[in-house]
Image (tube, grey):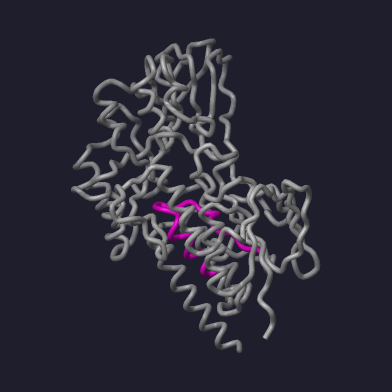
Amino acid sequence: MAAPPRVAVVGAGAAGLATLKALADADVPAVAYDSADTPGGLWVYGAPGSPAYRTLHLNTSRGRTEFADHPMPADWPDYPDHTRVAGYLDDYADRFGLRDHVRLGHTVERVTRAGDGWRVRAVGPDGPVEVDVEAVVVANGHNRTPRRPEPYPGECAAAQMHSHDYRGPEQLAGRRVLVVGGGNSAMDIAVDASYTADRTLLSLRRGVWVVPKYLLGRPSDTLNGALARRLPWRLRQRISQTMLTATVGPPARYGLPAPAHGFLQDHPTLSDALLSRLTHGDIHPRPGIAAFAGDRVEFTDGRVDEVDLVVWCTGYRVEVPFLDADLLGDGAERLPLYRHVFHLDAPGLAFVGLMQSTGAAFPLLEAQARLVAARLAGTWAPPEPARQAAACRAELRAATARWGQRRPHMRVDFDVYLTELRRELAAGRRRAGAAR
């Protein structure tokens, strides 16, 4: 029997740790490289490159977020804060003996093909390191490179920052703050500002569905999860949207723009506090920005406000800077991957976490990692290349129909995708058995 492949894992956040655990379970030797000085990735507050801020909490519930083989403590709140989540990942690394397989303080600079395998170049505390491996798993995350907005007409004299650089409410205290964006970070920062800033404006260029963290007395993501196991997404959309509108009302009720898309057709924005702060007049909603003029900002509805600080909550660019451009095609966020995991043209190259889920990430990372481990252990086999490419095209058509051009290559429906990965693992194991 051939020796199992040696594997390099890029990243030791949740995706990298889940990958190391799955590879260890499959007796596949692996080492992960991470630039930080502790595992945990973005959840480690204050770590280099981490976007975590002091008031950050999970926006998916504990029961829907935890790894299957490492449950979160039952006495934890439904939505733990970043300190608990970072500690949870630290405990995960200790429980499964992963720490000895992580090279901390090592920044991967280059991953290139080397014969039938791969060469990984990293720079660590003692200088450059090069290793040759049979396989590489990219698990570096995609919330590290802020996406800055395109310039608006006029000159902005107010201070500006991206949410990536936000750490706590003291940065907002006593200022006239404009928060721009409709995602979870934007809502959190606007709520923080509403308690400490002189005035808080929230600008949304397009409407989003704001979901409270509890509906009908339960974490809101558990309700849609129960529906997902039984109903197609279009029917779930009608039920969930009707329930949301009946319980909290449409976004326009709070002065927010109406969403252009139905519920479940974009990443959900969860906030318990935002709607309350809006109705109390502590956050002032605004549409998109039209222009700047010094410390004044004009909005598309003609209103003008003076601001001291603009916080851009405009998301992140998806970058894999250590891979050659020919491996990334039209870019990392448009890369076709079989089951969102395996590169179609580069055997031995896999990705864990290059996706955007309608729900939590950890269970999906765990399932992807198990698929990778089975592939590298030889217990799972992919279908022939033509079928892989056809599956990618079909998934892209369905994702584009649902999510439009908002990163359709990366979009997955949490419950549907988790079921798909389980079925794929079983099917691939049958293919591997038939090939022996």
- 17 left or right, relative to 326: left
Q: Is residue 418 above or below residue 289?
A: below
Quadrant for the N terminus, please: bottom right
Would residue 24 be counted in the magenta stretch? Answer: no
Figure quadrant of residue 390:
bottom right
Quadrant for the C terminus, please: bottom right
- 217 left or right, relative to 192: left
Figure quadrant of residue 16:
bottom right
- 223 left or right, relative to 11: left
Q: Is residue 294 above or below residue 382?
A: above
Outermost residue toward the right in this view: 115
Residue 405 lies, in percent from the top left, at: 51, 47
Residue in front for this viewpoint, 111 or 133: 133
Would residue 357 be counted in the magenta stretch? Answer: yes
- 287 left or right, relative to 239: right
Picture residue at 46% right of the left edge, 56% below the top = 91
Residue 47 lies, in percent from the top left, at: 56, 40
Figure quadrant of residue 173:
top left
Q: Which residues are magenta?
A: 349-371
Q: Is residue 339 visible?
A: yes
